[in-house]
Amino acid sequence: MTTQETRRLQARILLLALAVLVLLGLIAASLTAHAYYQQARDRADLAQQAALQHHGQAVAQYFDRLEDIAWQVASRSRIRDELAAYNRGATDLEDLQDFSHDKLEDALRPSGAAGIIRLDAEGRQVLAVGDANPDPIYWPDIDPAMRETRMRDHLAWEGRAWIMIAVPILSREDEWLGADILVFPAEALVGVLESAAEGGKAAWLEGPQGVVLRVDDITWSLMPTGAGNLVAPALQQARGGSQALQRTDGEVVFAVPVRPGWGLSMAVPEEELYAGMMAHLALPVGLVLGMALLSGLGLIGVIRPLSRQVVAQSEALERASEEQEDLLEYASGFVYRFDRSGRARYISPGVERVLGRSMDRLPETTLRALVEPFLPYLEGTAVPIDGGTDSELPPARAEVTDKAGNPVVLELNARVRYNSGHVVDIFGVARDVTSREEARRRVSHLANYDPLTDLPNRTQLDERLARAIERCRLHDERLAVLFVDLDGFKYVNDSLGHHRGDELLEAVARRLLGAIDRHSTIARHGGDEFVVLTEHIAGTDDAERVADNLLRALEAPFHVAGQELFIGASIGISLFPDDAASSDMLIRNADSAMYRAKARGRNNVQLYTADLTDASQRRLAIEAGLRRAIEGNELEVVYQPQWYLPGEGLSGAEALVRWRHPDFGMISPAEFIPVAEENGTIGLLGRWVLREAVRRTCEWGPQRLGRIGVNVSGHQVLFGDIAGDVRAVLEETGLEPWRLELEITEGFVMDHAERGIAVLEELRAMGVQLAIDDFGTGYSSLSYLKRLPVQRLKVDASFVQGADTDAADAALTASIIAMGHKLGLTVIAEGVETATQRDMIILDGCDEAQGYYLARPMSTEQMGALIEDPVPACRRD
């Protein structure tokens, strides 16, 4: 072989070696490029999926907030109770709307909703407030079985996007009362989706009914599912509760579940998602090819910059991932990753905004709280449903503290990741739900505590009393229930206003709470009623000591709005197991005993006795039937004649009301008048008696009956429009004002002289005559008496009836008659029952008299006959 051929052979060998080296370089470069490209693409996919997951968390948080608002509106007890009354037929639609409209508008204003639609138990709309009131075809599905909120897919209505949430209205016993539908403008939701659609991408949100809300950086639109869009399959998978990643026609589609039945999707062009990756890979490929052309030393020289380039590439991809995570900070959360040993490998910067600390400064207790719910999956003692593959783990909660020591509640969602069947790590998102938890706690507190006094309400009292009864049964112990009703509170509330009344109730609650021990519970039962539960008592003496402490606590005056107020209380006591075995009966029996305390002068304590049950039922029947009696002609007016002395000519008559009850027969005014004053029907009753008495007097004529006397309640003078009522009756009937005499008790005059004088002067200016009834029982001050515009004193029957047997009563009667004459007043004696009594008051100079000796109260027909023949009973035989 010649030198030239050798050289050619060497050249061929070199060329072959070079070709082999280049081929190996190309293979190595291709394998390297593919590996780097796949790794970079996986990281970009993971970052984009995490970004979308955080957008989904933001949407879920937005929906949670709307649901919390809806629950707060539906749980308002007063309008909920009014709806319950409407469902029972206890009130009509107009009253329901009048009562609820303003309260629902008050709830609407801070809620962010554009409208509230209230439905009754039959699903009928009874009320709507706000500007948004869509037709029922747009409403969520509603039925009496629902116990959670229901959402309707977003809808387009009047050029805007809306979200509707239906929430059940439930009674305290979890009974269906109806539903509220809250209509929210979807601008905030569109704003969240616009954040997901930044940079030319588009976001789709699909709900249970298959309506898709599409948002890009220009506009939003609604479309049915699968309407020619490439994200429909991914959305369908997300709505079923799984994440999805699909590649279609140059687009990468990501989808995540938002909540059951809801999915969020994002489509990103591949060239945008993986932009710059090929440019980054060009240099490593060129370096690998260069290795094939260099010697061994050159190959080593190329590997070193290649390694540096790989590190730089990894750092660039890491920075890109961090930039994606920064977009998630608005969602009140952060991303975390823990390895299989439970060590934190990564926590996103969002943790500093939530907890005030960066990852390297988080205390061990916080890190432990984040990973502890998932340790069984990391340690292999628990396996996900899709065991051995990447799987979503059940949501968990963690309670930690921030840098300032404030409690923070985190909701944890995580995935466990596997490699060849072995756990690698967990990757998840922590979301701050502290405000939502606080709202739920507030709702729970409002459901069990009175908002004015912060005392337990009826619901909480029932639960505590039931538990206390069980303890007593278990340990053979006793307990007492004390029913406390404030005396005189209604007058304070009506005269000073409800706002001042509320201030007084708060002050009373504080006093009562300070008067009980640790074995007792006090609850507000409603209005001015409180119930005290006291345990570990030996008998009635212990219960009465508790009641005495409560009364003493109320003895000192209360200072409200610059005024000094005195409030007492009537207290009834019932014991377990002596008086009742159930909580309802214990409270009912204590209530009955309380009414006995009121009947015995108020501001005292009474124990329950068996006879009170019948009395309580009778009182309830009277209270329930009083309004019906007024409107149903069960009442009648009788007349007791009044006579001049000494000649005994007919001077007038006093109108007295009687109630002929269909079950109880004739009921005395002394029994039903106090009930009318307490339940507010006294004004209606007083107007009826006044109109009936005046009408009959007009029929008899002035020549036949000169004057008719009508009793007036102090409540009518202070809180009604007695002057307006009298004026209206006089105008309606044409009765001369001087023929009408209004009788006001001396006790009322003493208690309310300053406030009552103005009203009495107005009545007197109309020409009406005024009389002080039951004089001698109220210890009147003469200074007040001479200021009153009255014309007549009526001596109380108790003095007159004792005048013929008791020297003191005789002296008092004579003194009252003399005092009345000194003041220029006409004096009439009540309750004259014997000839001796009549003769004694004649000797004392009394002007007129009435009583059984002269004439009993009589019906309208009997009074008409007496007017025709005006002879007193004592002369008829």
Image (cartoon, rainbow, N blue to C red):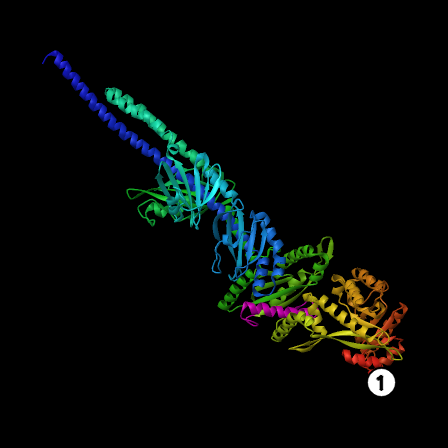
**Closest to the observer: 214 or 322?**
214
- Magenta span includes 323: no
The answer to whether one can see residue 548 in this image is yes
**Image-quadrant location for residue 716:** bottom right
Classify 10 Å Cα crowding around label 1: few (below 14), some (14-19), many (20 and above): few
**Image-quadrant location for residue 235:** top left
Circle 1 residue = 875
Where is residue 138 shown, x and y percent of the image?
50, 52
Above or below 176: residue 743: below
* Viewport quadrant of the C terminus: bottom right
- Magenta span includes 598: yes
The answer to whether one can see residue 431 in this image is no
Q: Would residue 736 be found to the left or right of residue 600 on screen?
A: right
Q: Would residue 362 be found to the left or right of residue 297 on screen?
A: right
Above or below 583: residue 667: below
The amino acid pointed to by label 1 is: Arg
Where is residue 514 shown, x and y percent of the image?
62, 57
Where is residue 85 shown, x and y percent of the image?
58, 63
Residue drawn at x 49%, y 42% is: 190
Residue found at the very far top of the displayed protein:
3
Q: Would residue 228 be found to the left or right of residue 830 on screen?
A: left
**Closest to the observer: 686 or 264?**
264
Highlighted magenta segment, given as a residue range:
576-605
The local secondary structure at tag 1 comes to helix
Where is residue 816 shown, x and y percent of the image?
85, 71
**Closest to the observer: 717 or 513?**
717
